[in-house]
Image: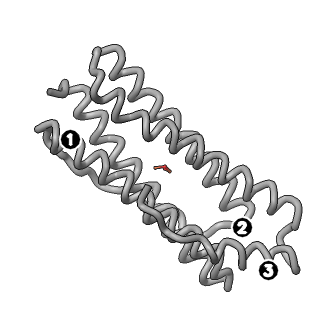
Amino acid sequence: MLSRKMTDALNGQINKELYSAYLYLAMSAWAENKGFKGFANWFHIQYQEETVHAMKIYHYLQEQGAAVALDAIQKPPSEFKTLLSAFEETLKHEQFITRSIHELVELALSEKDYATSIFLQWFVTEQVEEEANDNEIIGKLQMVGDKGHGLFMMDRELGGRKFEED
Ligand code: OFO
C-alpha cells in the first residue's frame, strides 16, 4: 500500500517521463528536418524509451492498487540551435530527472516503503546510463564540430541504434 505522498510523487514522475518523451520527439523531428536522419533515429528511440519509463511507473501504481492520475504535458521547444546544444539540453534534462528519481528514493526510504525503493533501483541505474550516453555524444560532437565528415560519420553511427525495451 502506497502513501498518498508517494502516489502523488510517482504520478508526478510519470508526467516528467512523458515530458522527456515529448522533448526527445521534438528533437527527433528537428534533426530529421535538418537532414540528420541518424540523430533523428537516436532521439526517436530515446522518445520510445521514455514512454516505457512512464509505463513502468504506471503499471507499478496499478499493481499497488494506487490511482494513476495523468496531468497535462508541458509543451517542448521545437527549435534547437545546433546538435551539440540539443545534446547539452538533453544532458541537463537528464540530470534533472536523476535528481527527481533520487528524491523519490529518499521519500521511499523515509517512509520505510521498501517495495518502492526496490522498484526505483532500476531507474537509478538507468539514469547513470542515460547521462553517460549523453556525455559520450557531447564529447564526440565537441571533437568533430558542427559540420563536415565527422558529423556525417556520427549521423551514420547513431542511425544504427535500435530500440530495446530494457
Ligand atoms: Fe526516463 O530517463 Fe530520461 O528522462
Q: Residue at x 74, y 62 (%)?
A: 84
Q: State the count of labels.
A: 3
Q: Residue at x 67, y 58 (%)?
A: 87
Secondary structure under badge 1?
A: helix
What amino acid type should be assigned to the residue bearing mark 3?
Phe
Secondary structure under badge 2?
A: helix
What amino acid type should be assigned to the residue bearing mark 1?
Leu
Q: Is residue 2 left or right of residue 43?
A: left
Q: Nearer the viewer, residue 44 or 126?
A: 126
Callout 1 crowding tier (Cα within 10 Å): few <14, some 14–19, many ≥20: many
Above or below 33: residue 8: above
Residue 141 image position (x, y, % from top left): 80, 62
Q: Residue at x 52, y 33 (%)?
A: 99
Q: Is residue 110 left or right of residue 80?
A: left
The disc at residue 152 is 3
The disc at residue 83 is 2
Residue 8 falls in image quadrant:
top left
Q: Which residue is mark 1?
A: 61
Q: Nearer the viewer, residue 57 or 86?
A: 57
The disc at residue 6 is none
Callout 3 crowding tier (Cα within 10 Å): few <14, some 14–19, many ≥20: some
